[in-house]
Each structure stands twice: as structure tokens, then as C-alpha cells.
Image (cartoon, grey):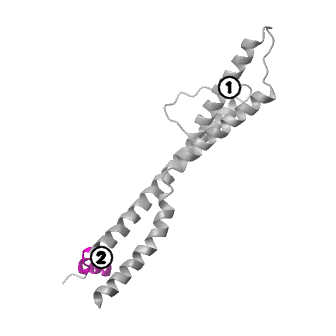
Amino acid sequence: MIAMSPILNAYFQADLFGKFIFFSLFILSIASWVILLHKMYLAKKLKLLNSRFEKKVQANNENILSITINSNLTYPYLNIYKSLKDKTLEILNKNRFFINEKKKVYMSSKDIELIDSHLDVEILKQTKLLEKNLFILPTVVTLGPFLGLLGTVWGILITF
């Protein structure tokens, strides 16, 4: 006779509700591992892309608004940079339009505050995208012990 693991043995001896508890714990475990592995892959990929972008910024730090990225990939540093570049050029063009003289155009402190608030919003958007689906992990951590306890209580109730 082939020896079965105690977990499989308990599963096959359980009634329908007991099997549901086993299945729920299994699904929650799989979901946790999928999210963990996906976030690890994403972190590794973003670290590489962000370091490449950082090198480009350091190489062009004389004129930071002239950096061009020919990439279909989107990642946090690039999205924040594009947002900064677009908003800064928009404000500079607006200031250039309203100044009649042919001198250099500067930004006022209000313009810089506007860019700062715009960047804060963009950083929040990027953070939200990176934290997507992380709410599942605390839910699983909270739900797992309760399902285990429910399975224990259910097993005791069925026994007697």
C-alpha cells in the first residue's frame, strides 16, 4: 500500500465543507505566491530600467529637459520625468508667449510650486500603480488563521 501524506489523507477523509476549507486555504496560498513572485519580478525589472534612466539623466545633466527616451516601456522614473518635462515646457512656453522681449524666460516661484504639486500627484499615481494588488496579502494573512481554526472546529464537531 502506498503511504499518503497526512494532508492528502485529511483532505480525502473530510466532508464537503472540510474540502472547501482546504481548497480555500490552497487558493489563498497560491494567490499570495503569485503576487509575491510578480512583485519580485517587477522590482527587479524596474530597478534595471530606473538605473538606465538615471545614467541618462546624469549624462545629460546640463540640459535635463532635452533627454529623449525611445522606449515603449513605461516605468515610474520615466513617467515622472515625462510629467515634469511636459509641465515645465508648458509653463516656459506660456511665459515666453506673454513676454514680448527676446530675452531668456524664467519661471516664477508660483510656477515652481505648480510643477511641484504636479509632480506630487504624478508620484502618488506611480506609487499607486506599484502597490496595486498588495491589499490581498494582508487579507490572506488575516483570513488564513481563521480558516484554519474553522477547519479545526469543524473537524472536532464532525468527530463527536
For label 2, the crowd category at 10 Å Cα-Cα, with few meaning under 14, some 14 to 19 and many 20 or more, is many
- What segment is highlighted magenta in the picture? 5-16
The label shown at residue 65 is 1
Residue placed at 33% from the left, 72% from the top?
Answer: 21
N-terminal-most mark, 2 or 1: 2
The verdict on residue 32 being magenta is no
Seen as rendered, the residue at the extreme bottom is 160
Circle 1: element type: helix
Number of numbered discs overlaid on the protein picture: 2
Seen as rendered, the residue at the extreme left is 1
Q: Which residue is mark 2?
A: 18
Q: Amino acid at mark 2?
A: Gly
Residue 120 position in % (x across, y down): 67, 40
Quarter holding the N terminus? bottom left
Residue 79 position in % (x across, y down): 58, 35
Q: Amino acid at mark 1?
A: Leu
Q: Is residue 21 left or right of residue 1?
A: right
